[in-house]
Image (cartoon, rainbow, N blue to C red):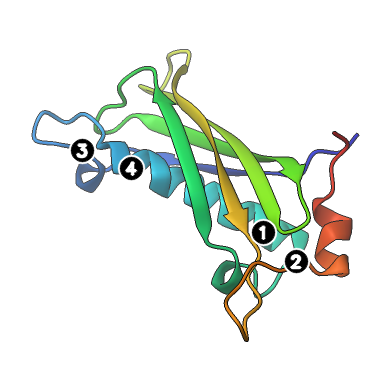
Amino acid sequence: MRVPAGTHRGRVEWIDTDAAGIHHNTAIARYVESAEAALIRGLGLDGYFPVAPRVRYEVDFEAPLRFGDEVAATVRVERLGRSSLTFGFEVWGGPAGTPPVRAARGRYVTVHLDPAGGTASPWPDAWRAVLDVAE
């Protein structure tokens, strides 16, 4: 089974932290969104973002990331519904040269909107073909 996934790699920048140099909770969401964008680009799903808002987001914060740490966020498709799409994610990081620790994990759900009416509508068949995963 092929599970569609995307990854973001980078560093914790000063803008990602509080005055103590520890990551803001919102930084995790940005890393995850960057990984999601990599996944969507890799699948060739042009036009996805304007019609797929998040309707649910949950995260468990497990360890702090600090300014300058390396960070890697990976997003995987977990479930494709009629009009919903569930992603799971993990964010790992730490100082260069040390084993990474899992800083956060969670999942979120997007819903496909009909661009004309703004209501939930089925995913286009061509998108379903590249997003579908075995349950």
Quick one: label 4, few (<14), some, or many (20+) residues within 10 Å? some
Q: In the image as oriented, which residue stretches furthest toward the bottom? A: 116
Mark 2 lies on a secondary structure that is: loop
What x and y, as percent, mark residue 20? 11, 28
In space, the residues marked 3 and 1 are separated at their CA atoms by: 27 Å
In space, the residues marked 2 and 3 are separated at their CA atoms by: 33 Å
Question: The residue under label 4 is which amino acid type?
Answer: Ala
Examine the image and state in which quarter residue 40 appears: bottom right
Mark 3–mark 4 contact, CB under 8 Å? yes
In space, the residues marked 1 and 4 are separated at their CA atoms by: 20 Å
Q: Nearer the viewer, residue 20 or 50?
A: 50
From the image, tell me which residue sits under label 3: 17
What x and y, as percent, mark residue 53? 53, 62
Q: Nearer the viewer, residue 52 or 14?
A: 52
Question: The residue under label 1 is which amino acid type?
Answer: Ile
Examine the image and state in which quarter residue 47 appears: bottom right
Relative horizontal placement of residue 126, taking residue 73 as reference (left or right): right
Instruction: Give me the residue at 66% from left, 65% from top.
Output: 112
What x and y, as percent, mark residue 52? 59, 64
From the image, tell me which residue sits under label 4: 27
Relative horizontal placement of residue 115, taking residue 64 as reference (left or right): right
Instruction: Give me the residue at 26% from left, 33% from top.
Output: 23
In space, the residues marked 3 and 4 are separated at their CA atoms by: 8 Å
Question: The residue under label 2 is which amino acid type?
Answer: Gly
From the image, tell me which residue sits under label 2: 44
Q: Earlier in the sequence, mark 2 or mark 4?
A: 4
Q: Earlier in the sequence, mark 3 or mark 1?
A: 3
What x and y, as percent, mark residue 90? 54, 29
In space, the residues marked 2 and 4 are separated at their CA atoms by: 26 Å
Mark 2–mark 1 contact, CB under 8 Å? no
Q: What number is the disc on residue 40?
A: 1
Mark 1–mark 4 contact, CB under 8 Å? no
